[in-house]
Amino acid sequence: MANYTVPMVEHTARILETLGAASHPLRLKEITAASGSGRTSAFRVLHTLAKLGYITKNEQRGTYQLATKLFEIAWQGYKSVGIVQCVRPYMQQLCKLFDETVNLAVLQDTGIFYAAVTESSQAFRMEAKVGSPAPLHATAVGKAISAFQKPEDVKKLVKNCAWNRITPRTIRSQGRYFKELKKVRALGYGLDNEEAEIGASCVAAPITNAGGEAIGALSISGPTHRIRRKRKGIIRELKKACTTVSGVLVSVENQGFHLET
């Protein structure tokens, strides 16, 4: 049987898989060791991928990591099926009600990513990019999803968290974060009080499966002064929408349809 395999494509795939499995940016030496690629081949592949926007390179440290472009491509096919299709009408309803940006984030393996965004008509608005990761420790969706996980699953999420300081308000310790999750579980929603961006705030509630575990979250974000003014109504309607969405998704699953998250 003819072998139609392209060696350079194999090298590229292994390098992307190596970067995807890493919990931190990697140096060329680490990439070649983990992927089994030669130094010259790996360097050429990395240079090309960086030029095309699939990975980013830190010139000072000489490290590489995946860029969001791969996630964006993956979500293009995902957007037409599954959870996004079910949730979209509720996102539009919430956006119309408060005229603030509504985001859907989902749990994928050990990370949280934005799967859909319905933008506000306001000139000054907050928006996340579809396919981009949501920092676990600094976003309302990160807290809402983490708070409604099994203890062992929360540990996996926390293990992969960089705890980097995004603003002076960002939570940077596990102890403080776990206290925050306890509060989120009690209230049924999570808050981002300028922890991801100064001047911007967000409220999020979890979307849960039949076992009560979060598979995603809906959030409403905007300038802090507007979110604070509308927060009481946002919390009420957001929790109501997420409860309805959770019921719809459980019903769909019970009918034998599997929704990818």
Image (spheres, helix red, strand yellow):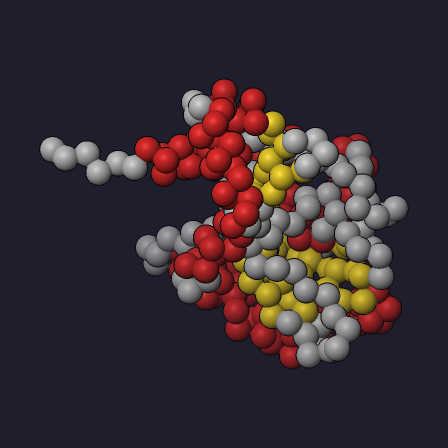
Q: Looking at the image, which is closer to me, 161 or 97? A: 161
Name, please, the residue furthest toward the top. Answer: 33
Name the residue: 55% across, 62% down. Answer: 116
Residue 207, x across and y down, in percent:
57, 55
Q: Looking at the image, which is closer to me, 93 or 37? A: 37
Left or right, 41 with respect to 27, comes to left
Name the residue: 57% across, 59% down. Answer: 130
Q: Looking at the image, which is closer to me, 127 or 144? A: 127
Name the residue: 64% across, 72% down. Answer: 119
Q: Quadrant of the N terminus?
A: top left
Q: Looking at the image, which is closer to me, 228 or 166? A: 166
Name, please, the residue furthest toward the left. Answer: 1
Residue 37, x across and y down, in percent:
43, 25
Q: Is any part of residue 212 visible from this angle?
A: no
Residue 235, x across and y down, in percent:
73, 64
**Looking at the picture, does residue 239 appear above or below residue 45?**
below
**Looking at the picture, does residue 142 appear above or below residue 100?**
above
Left or right, 126 with respect to 258, comes to right
**Looking at the picture, does residue 240 appear above or below residue 164?**
below
Name the residue: 48% across, 27% down. Answer: 40
Left or right, 35 with respect to 131, comes to left
Q: Is any part of residue 176 visible from this angle?
A: yes
Residue 203, x across and y down, in percent:
73, 60
Q: How many marks?
A: 0
